[in-house]
């Protein structure tokens, strides 16, 4: 006879154990879009203590909707090795352009990352950072429904040696750092420069070039990197996002 209390305890005990393991991390990733998932995959594969937090129920960020809800994405030559690493089937459209089912891509990124040891927490919003010794040293987290309903509930905290802001267009982690601490960023202006309009070629290049440590302890990847450093947007071509996640992971990995 199935016992509801055992089912409930199984969920609570397993989840709490997973969360406790994520309280002291090598790397905390905020945002489960393409760049965050790829960064998490490579860091987990390298044996680092890494966890990813996303405020949504379904992680995957901007992949699901492809371009204007046509759920296919495009990837260029440069990122094919990353796509192959995840075992996603390649469909050539024409020379230099490949299409991938958005849903297949999200599923593969998530599955492979978890398989290599990435801990993923959905429905958790990162609302603030831990700032110690002049660097970003962790995250302040709360259940997403708390943020949505505006309930006055205090958050919980975790420590991380490095953090990656992979929150896409709004660059939410860098924004909170600037708003609350008034610090000078490692950008031309010292502030968040803001994303530029569409140029797929430049946008893809900028996404990778702008992936770097923007403040001690805090990296930016994906579209957040372009928002912070003033890169162009590129729309539903995703090679730059994948390569950005890989670059963030490699740079952090070298420093740990
Ligand atoms: O936007 P998103 O997919 O990030 P990305 O890796 O990729 C960008 C592309 O999808 C697309 C594009 C390509 O042409 O331009 O936009 O840069 O995913 C960002 C994730 O961050 C989560 C959000 O729910 C989304 O899944 N997120 C944002 N703010 C927070 C957050 C927060 N404060 N706490 C937790 N998660």
Image (spheres, rainbow, N blue to C red):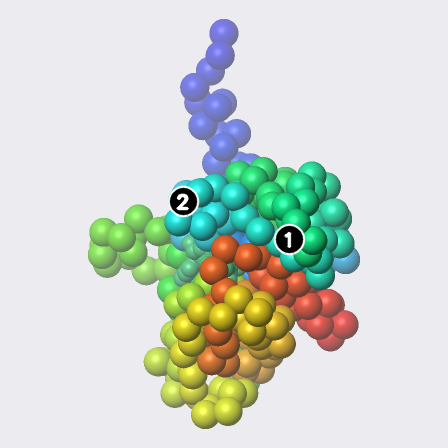
Residue 234, image x, y percentages:
50, 65
**Residue farthest top in this picture:** 1
Q: Residue at x 52, y 29 (%)?
A: 10
- In which quadrant will I find the C terminus? bottom right
* Inter-mark Cα distance, 2 to 1: 19 Å
Q: Is mark 1 within 8 Å of ligand 1?
A: no
Q: 232 above or below 20?
A: below
Residue located beneath label 2 in the image: 69
**Foreground tag (2 vs 1):** 1
Residue 122, image x, y percentages:
46, 47
Label 1: few (<14), some (14–19) or many (≥20) C-alpha neighbours in 10 Å: few
Q: Residue at x 49, y 7 (%)?
A: 1
Q: In which quadrant of the rendered view does residue 169 lie?
A: bottom left
Q: Residue at x 32, y 60 (%)?
A: 154
Q: Residue at x 62, y 76 (%)?
A: 209
Of 209 and 129, the residue lying toward us:
209
Please, what secondary structure does the residue beneath circle 2 have? loop
Q: Is mark 2 within 8 Å of ligand 1?
A: no
Left or right for 100, reference 47: left
Please, what secondary structure does the residue beneath circle 1 have? strand
Residue 25, image x, y percentages:
62, 62
Residue 65, image x, y percentages:
44, 46
Q: In which quadrant of the rendered view does residue 79 lie?
A: bottom right
Mark toward the start of the polypeptide (2 vs 1): 2
Q: 93 above or below 140?
A: above
Residue located beneath label 1 in the image: 97
Q: 11 above or below 170?
A: above
Q: Are marks 2 and 1 in contact (CB under 8 Å)?
A: no
């Amino acid at each position: 006879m199935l016992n509801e209390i055992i089912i409930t305890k199984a969920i609570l005990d397993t989840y709490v154990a997973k969360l406790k393991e994520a309280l002291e991390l090598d790397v905390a990733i905020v945002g489960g879009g393409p760049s965050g998932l790829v960064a998490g995959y490579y860091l987990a594969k390298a044996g680092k203590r890494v966890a990813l937090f996303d405020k949504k129920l379904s992680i995957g960020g901007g992949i699901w909707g492809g371009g204007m809800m046509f759920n296919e994405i495009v990837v260029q030559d440069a990122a094919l090795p990353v796509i192959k690493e995840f075992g996603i089937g390649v469909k050539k459209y024409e020379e230099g352009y490949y299409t991938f089912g958005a849903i297949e891509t999200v599923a593969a990124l998530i599955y492979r990352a978890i398989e290599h040891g990435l801990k993923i927490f959905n429905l958790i919003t990162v609302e603030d950072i831990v700032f110690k010794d002049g660097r970003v040293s962790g995250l302040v987290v709360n259940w997403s429904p708390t943020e949505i309903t505006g309930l006055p509930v205090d958050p919980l905290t975790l420590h991380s040696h490095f953090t990656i802001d992979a929150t896409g267009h709004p660059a939410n982690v860098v924004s909170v750092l600037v708003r609350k601490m008034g610090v000078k960023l490692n950008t031309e202006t010292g502030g968040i420069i803001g994303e530029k309009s569409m140029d797929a070629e430049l946008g893809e290049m900028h996404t990778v070039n702008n992936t770097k440590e923007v403040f001690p302890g805090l990296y930016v990847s994906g579209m957040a990197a372009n928002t912070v450093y003033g890169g162009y947007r590129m729309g539903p071509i995703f090679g730059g996002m994948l390569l950005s996640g890989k670059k963030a992971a490699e740079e952090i990995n070298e420093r740990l």
